[in-house]
Amino acid sequence: MSKLAPLKRVLDQVQRLPRLVPWRHDARSAEAVPDAARTANPSVGLLPRDQAGRAQVAPATAAACRDRRQGDIVHTSSLPVIEPDGSVRQHPTPEGAVLLSQTCDVVQPDRLTVVAAPLVRLSGDELTQATRGTRPRYVAVPAVGTDTFADLDIISTLDKDILVRASATTGVGLDDMEIRRFGRRVARRFGRFPFPDEVVPWLMPLADVIVSKHDKLTGEALALEQVVELRVEATEGWAIPPYALTLVTIVRAGTLPELEEDDQINPPSSLRSWLRTPNGELRRTPGDIAKRLHAHQLDSSGNSSAPTPAERYHLWLALAEAWAARCVPRGRYKDDEAVAGAVAGGAVTADIVSEDEYSLVRYRRSEQLDVDHLSPPTPA
């Protein structure tokens, strides 16, 4: 055997090493290595980078993204969802997918991906609740139709190159309020306050009213149309129970008439005796109060007259109080000691404020009452 044979075998092994173990200087991050979806030229090793060294999308992708913004609809047939075993299934999106990423992230070339949710069409009670905004899972996409929504139960990350291949259309108009509303409702899905489990049974009865009454031809339904939000304030915070809770009914500007101070304090005597017992306790249900408040709208004969400004003001105050009085645990929660002791004084107090008078300070220390996340706490 030649004396050079061992050396030849060593050289052969060295030549094979690059195919077995990548050289350190050739290693790339997952972000920098393109796949078939990122480029049509597989020989391209790295994404373009800006002067600061940040990876950039390809020029064609950047050009496609410049015309896109939050709320646009990408016409793709499915979105990827990871299964428990790590595999990826494709969730069908026959109506397309709605871009949820903020517009600045969509257009910036150093943001390599966007997030999107399926566009769905709703009907029935689900449509009613989503339209009103009491189902945070759904965000209206008004440019397509009154029944179309982004379903935030499915959210997927997409490579921006999909915006080159898939056509896209406007989902949210150019109106500033419409754009802000869409952005706020997307953000709201992820910023909802987790009410303590023992507080949820107190709020559920009112949530049930919101679901059952809205969009019906009743006084309470008509009243709910004037409500911008129902918010819950904890005066002493949420750190330690019992919580001092106030249900704040925020109504549209102009709903509450302007009155002299004496008229704000003293309701008309006939209305007071109808609303309250001699010791001042409310004797009417929310349905009764709302029916009297909107009797002139419910009476097709035209014989009922609209309440006077003073009557309207005090009926609204009483209605807000009656809604707060609904917040009482029911069923199996009535005998739960932790639930019973969760609310200070054993009752939720009431307040009513016009939207143009509700302060930012109060807004920051309160939480919106949503239907979607008020599910019963898990039994022990």
Image (tube, rainbow, N blue to C red):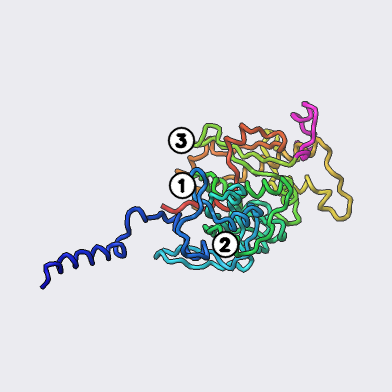
**What type is the residue that disc 3 sits on?**
Ile
Q: Quadrant of residue 177?
A: top right
Q: Nearer the viewer, residue 194 or 280?
A: 194
Which residue matches tag 1?
336
Relative image position of residue 205 (x, y in whole percent): 59, 50
Query: Is 344 left or right of 292, judged from the image as shown?
Result: left
Relative image position of residue 10 (x, y in whole percent): 19, 64
Identify the magenta region.
253-272
Q: Residue at x 51, y 61 (%)?
A: 38
| Among numbered discs 1 and 3, the one appearing first in the sequence | 3
Q: Residue at x 76, y 56 (%)?
A: 217
Query: Is 107 left or right of 29, judged from the image as shown?
Result: right
Callout 2: helix, strand or loop?
Answer: helix
Query: Is 159 left or right of 280, judged from the image as shown?
Result: left
What's the CA distance linking mark 1 and mark 3? 18 Å
Q: Mark 2, residues whose alpha carbon is within 10 Å: few (<14), some, or many (≥20)?
A: some
What's the CA distance linking mark 2 and mark 3? 49 Å
Is residue 160 depicted above or below 294 in this figure? below
| Among numbered discs 2 and 3, the one appearing first in the sequence | 2
What's the CA distance linking mark 1 and mark 2? 53 Å
**Quadrant (top left/top right/bottom left/bottom right) for the N terminus:** bottom left
Q: Nearer the viewer, residue 59 or 4?
A: 4
Which residue matches tag 2?
162
Callout 1: helix, strand or loop?
Answer: loop
**What type is the residue that disc 1 sits on?**
Asp
Which residue matches tag 3?
240
